[in-house]
Image (cartoon, rainbow, N blue to C red):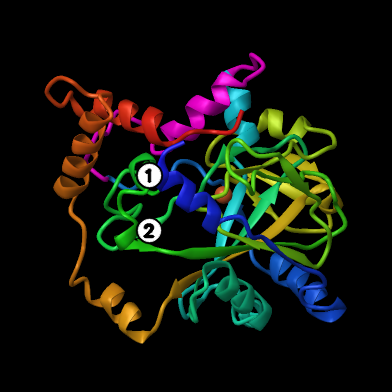
Amino acid sequence: MMAGCDRIWQAARMAILLDPLLGAEGAESMLRVRDAFGPYGMYSNEGHDTGYAPELPQRIDAIRNHLRHGNGEPVGTVAARTNYFRETYAYGDEITAPGIEPFLHHEGLAAAARSIHGRELVVPAIVFANLYLPGQELAIHTDVPEFRGANRTVTPQWLVVAMHHSGLFDRWRMPIATGVSFFGPGESGALVTYPEGPDGPRVEVAPRHDTALVLDTDTVFHGVDRVAGDDTAIRSARPGMRLHPGARWQLRDGDAVVAEIDPASIRFSVSWKGYCFVDDADRRRWAEHGDDLTLDRILDTIEADLRSREVLRTDRPAPAEFGLAIVDTYTRFPG
Ligand SMILES: [Fe+2]
């Protein structure tokens, strides 16, 4: 294994389980926040036009790996299974789901983030809800990390992911801790993780009410096992449909009700992400953009590394081909 990757995996071995997370009253209020928000949209491919190699889907890395392990289902069904529902509850100080504040500022989540990255200054960045209907699942992946000058808004997601796995850009990386919390009665749809790296064992965490697992999801490969139950609704799901809370939740296509779902069968998790700074000077460096990467520098650095590994022996190929070489070299999946 490459030296850079070894270093990353050593830093990522820790995952911290918070049980209970909020206590009975706090956990119930999370379900009220869930029900008062909505409707929930699908997490289709996010549309940032990042310019480089536009012919490659943003998560070509995870898609290729998922299809390698596919069971021959039609592409539309595979897409509906993985196109879960997601909405943002808080973004920085901006609250879009009133009542989420105690979760956003939860001291246990911040303390776990501090110990995972060994960094003192943790700033909550985002809180978002994930809802999976019976039959839905999430392919194994690592999250899109952030670097000074490179993130999902300006850089293709597959490239930001590969940058992290390469270990070539550690100096610019913003370590992020993610708390994945669970609320509600359903316990299917395990969070699947590989905490010791792609060669290590698969560890499953059941989504138990009022618990959270805090880990470095930018480094640790993870996914969601298929949620049990009647998957009729998902077989009718198409991009753009929305999920409306109620006594029976409704999947709607515009105003038309496509399916009704028992809320107890829906897997509900809330993700918290915190930026982990060394100190205030580190935070200022991030905010002031004084030492940002550029796309040219990223690609030149990677090209030099690929040449030293003798993966690349010719001129740099066209972006899409170069992109696939980058993904295949650095983003090595479990199994
Ligand atoms: Fe993830």
The answer to which of 235 and 185 lies nearer the viewer is: 185
Residue most extreme to the top:
72
Q: Which residue is mark 1?
A: 157
Lateral position of residue 185 relative to residue 54, left or right: right
- Asked if the stretch drawn in magenta spans residue 71, the answer is yes
Q: Are marks 2 and 1 in contact (CB under 8 Å)?
A: no
- Asked if the stretch drawn in magenta spans residue 276, the answer is no
Q: Provide residue 220's location: percent of width, then percent of height.
A: 57, 49
The answer to which of 280 and 133 lies nearer the viewer is: 280
139 is higher (above) or lower (below) than 296: above
Lateral position of residue 49 relative to residue 96, left or right: left
Which residues fall within the magenta stretch?
Answer: 50-74
* Residue 45 in view of the camera: yes
Q: Provide residue 74's location: percent of width, then percent of height.
A: 61, 17
Q: How far apart are the two marked residues, 2 and 1, measured between alpha carbons?
A: 10 Å
Residue lying at 48% horizontally and 25% vertically, measured from the top left? 64
- Residue 146 is tagged as 2
Residue lying at 56% horizontally and 20% vertically, measured from the top left? 68
Q: Secondary structure at mark 2?
A: strand
Q: Is mark 1 within 8 Å of ligand 1?
A: no
The answer to which of 241 and 94 lies nearer the viewer is: 94
